[in-house]
Image (cartoon, rainbow, N blue to C red):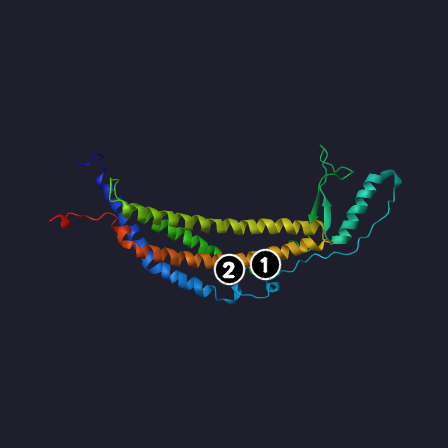
């Protein structure tokens, strides 16, 4: 007799959910995982991830640095304003970037004679573009990462539902189930870290590009951007390789232990007679 009363309608729905998860997970392990590893293996042979000369993935930084043009102060009575304007025009000539001052508004709604506030950079071309080649490659890799995370969660749920009730002894099969669940969890976390890595790439590159806008005459800032792009390109190829390896590892491990995973405890009653 059950110690907990469960509504029959709810119980039937839960049982249907368990059967659905079982069917999906078994199909993933038997068919989807091997197909996916072959697909990713072919992806690794694609020319887009086998560029030898990394300069081919560099993107043009459309921001030229010219010689500065300094203007002398025209009004000795307004040294601070004149110095500021001279520096502003010099920087504008130097970088090709216009600087616009925020206008200070009086209480009555009229514009103050002296414009104050933080200067805002306006790019001549409207926007500093991302590296288009890397963006295209990232957009191909991200769905593969998401797919692995989702499929690992499905298989992990299936194995968790196969764990029998806690008993003393005869738990070797249960330990195999727990090891499988742990491995699936680790793979899922590793895949999530790849998404974080892509986000950090964009943030890092944006910071470096802002440095170029501010100091266009410093060549090292420009080189940091190309180095970051090259590093991300190499990392993306490694990510695809790791995704492929995860599929073959999980497929192999689960198939080798499928008997213990599906039937963690064997009955010894037949051997007693």
Looking at the rendered structure, the secondary structure element under dot 2 is helix
Circles 1 and 2: CB distance less than 8 Å? no
Counting residues from the start of the chain, the first of labels 1 and 2 encountered is 1
Left or right, 27 with reference to 47: left
Q: Which residue is the extreme one toward the top?
A: 107
Kindly report the distance in space between the C-alpha atoms of the residues bearing marks 1 and 2: 11 Å
Give the percent coordinates (x, y) of residue 81.
81, 40
Q: Quadrant of residue 10?
A: top left
**Disc assigned to residue 90:** none
Q: Residues within 10 Å of mark 2 (few under 14, many from 20)?
A: some
Give the percent coordinates (x, y) of residue 216.
72, 53
Give the percent coordinates (x, y) of residue 261.
28, 51
Q: Is residue 95 visible?
A: yes
| Residue at which label 2 appears | 237
Left or right, 273 with reference to 140: left
Residue 34 to residue 175: above or below:
below
Looking at the rendered structure, the secondary structure element under dot 1 is helix
| Residue at which label 1 appears | 230
Q: Residue at x 44, y 64 (%)?
A: 41
Q: Residue at x 40, y 64 (%)?
A: 38
Q: Quadrant of residue 2?
A: top left
Residue 87 to residue 244: above or below:
above
In depth, the one of 106 and 42 nearer the eye is: 42
Q: Quadrant of the N terminus?
A: top left
Give the percent coordinates (x, y) of residue 86.
81, 46
Q: Residue at x 79, y 49 (%)?
A: 89
Q: Residues within 10 Å of mark 1 (few under 14, many from 20)?
A: some
In depth, the one of 262 and 132 nearer the eye is: 262
């Amino acid at each position: 007799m059950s110690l907990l009363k469960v509504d029959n309608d709810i119980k039937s729905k839960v049982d249907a959910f368990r059967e659905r998860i079982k069917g999906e997970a078994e199909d993933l392990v038997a068919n989807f995982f091997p197909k996916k590893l072959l697909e990713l293996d072919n992806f690794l042979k694609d020319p887009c991830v086998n560029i030898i000369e990394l300069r081919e993935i560099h993107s043009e930084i459309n921001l030229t640095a010219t010689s500065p043009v300094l203007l002398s102060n025209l009004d000795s009575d307004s040294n601070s304003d004149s110095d500021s304007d001279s520096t502003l025009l010099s920087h504008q000539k130097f970088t090709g970037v216009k600087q616009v001052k925020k206008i200070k508004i009086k209480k009555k709604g009229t514009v103050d004679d002296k414009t104050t506030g933080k200067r805002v950079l306006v790019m001549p071309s409207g926007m500093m573009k991302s590296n288009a080649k890397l963006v295209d490659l990232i957009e191909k890799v991200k769905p593969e990462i998401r797919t692995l995370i989702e499929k690992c969660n499905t298989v992990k749920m299936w194995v968790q539902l196969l764990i029998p009730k806690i008993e003393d002894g005869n738990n070797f099969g249960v330990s195999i189930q727990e090891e499988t669940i742990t491995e699936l969890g680790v793979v899922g976390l590793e895949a999530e870290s790849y998404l974080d890595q892509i986000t950090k790439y964009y943030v890092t590159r944006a910071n470096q590009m802002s440095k170029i806008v501010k100091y266009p005459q410093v060549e090292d800032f420009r080189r940091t951007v190309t180095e970051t792009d090259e590093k991300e390109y190499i990392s993306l190829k490694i990510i695809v390789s790791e995704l492929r390896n995860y599929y073959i590892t999980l497929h192999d491990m689960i198939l080798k232990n499928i008997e213990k995973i599906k039937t963690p405890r064997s009955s010894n009653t037949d051997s007693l007679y």
